[in-house]
Amino acid sequence: MSKYHVDEHGFYGEFGGAFIPEMLYPNVEELRQHYLEIMASESFQQEFRKLLRDYVGRPTPLYYAERLSEKYGSRIYLKREDLCHTGAHKVNNTIGQILMAKRLGKKRIIAETGAGQHGVATATVCALMGLPCVVYMGEVDIARQAPNVARMKLLGAEVRPARSGSRTLKDATNEAIRDWINNPEDTHYIIGSVVGPHPYPDMVARFQAVISEEIRHQLLEAEGRTDPDYLIACVGGGSNAAGTYYHYLDQEEVQIIAAEAAGKGVDTGESAATSALGRVGIIHASKTLLMQTADGQITEPYSISAGLDYPGVGPMHAHLFQTGRAQFIPVTDAQAMAGGRELARLEGIIPAIESSHAFAVLEMGAVPPDSLVVINLSGRGDKDLQTYIDYFDLT
Ligand SMILES: *Cc1c(COP(=O)(O)O)cnc(C)c1O
């Protein structure tokens, strides 16, 4: 039995589970009963692998970053998820889930989105499969993320505003859950990270595990060994990190680093550093670490990076933190932006600001020299250009 993968009850240590309202039980149970069998079937694997290759563009390269390596005195490889179709790792999961939905006989897809990246990845695969798609999005986020709203609409999705509460991600999530309760027969809910009720965290981790599967092969080819000394990824909900770590979780000699968003600083009240600030609670139907007030109200997170701006973390990561298997490093906006600019100047690659958090740990001295390092470059920076412009005054 693995210490770090999900157990038969849907838990990672004390975290995880499915704390769902009664009315959601049939939907989640249907998925729980079938997901492993469907994923293991040959026809599923064939279709999944083919789309990953021909549509997403996998395998993504494992690129030896020579100038970055020179600067830090280590051998540093970048896993190029930024080269995936739609610009980030999220599509690995949405492809997997749309194939799952089809095999479960579902005719309609719903999703929630914060910054819009998951909404775009979902709208993309719905267009690919010709399925109707409704994306719930907070009214405030719709106003802030106009280009992604336009992308979703161009792809044929309907974007429904969530007008309750703070009109952001958690309100969109509530609306999506309400929709699912009302449409249990024909609708599949595509969750975008390793969060939500069991089996979602495990299912999403398995779809993203293609990342670590490829790293093992590619590192063996490049370095004559499958295992690096260090694996580094940024953590919002934790899906790109889960995919990067997946095949290495039980190899304790591989050091795992999780970069989380400290915003303006862990103690400033404007942060999303869940491991540093979170306490045990329930969010999105899962028991995990969660930023909350003394009486259990979820705290609004803050990060310059929209994809890391989440008050919780997936249950696998809560467990990795609690057991000490992974080292969680809070990275401020300023450290992340500097890390992103450095990658642009040393390697000619402009990362998503989420990914920039992973690069910042190099400058923070988290990796000793002479190490073999793999950093997951979760996405490209095109979507963040305006933030880079404003931050560095590039006009
Ligand atoms: C959404 C996103 C993230 C954060 O999500 P995880 O589930 O933690 O991976 C990180 N990087 C990029 C580029 C993203 O789009």
Image (tube, helix red, strand yellow):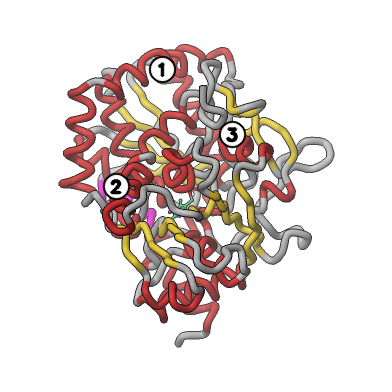
Q: Is residue 150 magenta?
A: yes
Q: Which residue is mark 3?
A: 315
Q: Residue at x 33, y 42 (%)?
A: 213
Q: Residue at x 42, y 38 (%)?
A: 247
Tag 2: residue type?
Answer: His
Q: Is residue 32 magenta?
A: no
Q: Which residue is mark 2?
A: 217
Graded by Cα atoms within 10 Å as few (under 14), some (14 to 19) or many (20 or more), the crowding at tag 1 reads some
Q: What is the span of residues highlighted in magenta in the rendered image?
A: 148-155
> As drawn, is 268 to the left or to the right of 131?
right
Q: Circle 3 sits in a helix, a strand or a loop, which is it?
A: helix
> As drawn, is 58 to the left or to the right of 87?
left
Q: Which residue is mark 1?
A: 184
Tag 1: residue type?
Answer: Pro
Contact between marks 1 and 2 (CB within 8 A): the answer is no
Graded by Cα atoms within 10 Å as few (under 14), some (14 to 19) or many (20 or more), the crowding at tag 3 reads many
**Number of numbered labels in the structure image:** 3
| Depicted 44 relative to depicted 392: above or below | above
Graded by Cα atoms within 10 Å as few (under 14), some (14 to 19) or many (20 or more), the crowding at tag 2 reads some
The main secondary structure of the magenta stretch is helix
Tag 3: residue type?
Answer: Pro
Q: Circle 1 sits in a helix, a strand or a loop, which is it?
A: loop
Q: Which of 240/221 is in front?
A: 221
Q: Residue at x 38, y 56 (%)?
A: 148
Per the model, the C-alpha gap separating discs 1 and 3 is 25 Å
At which x and y percent is residue 49? 21, 37
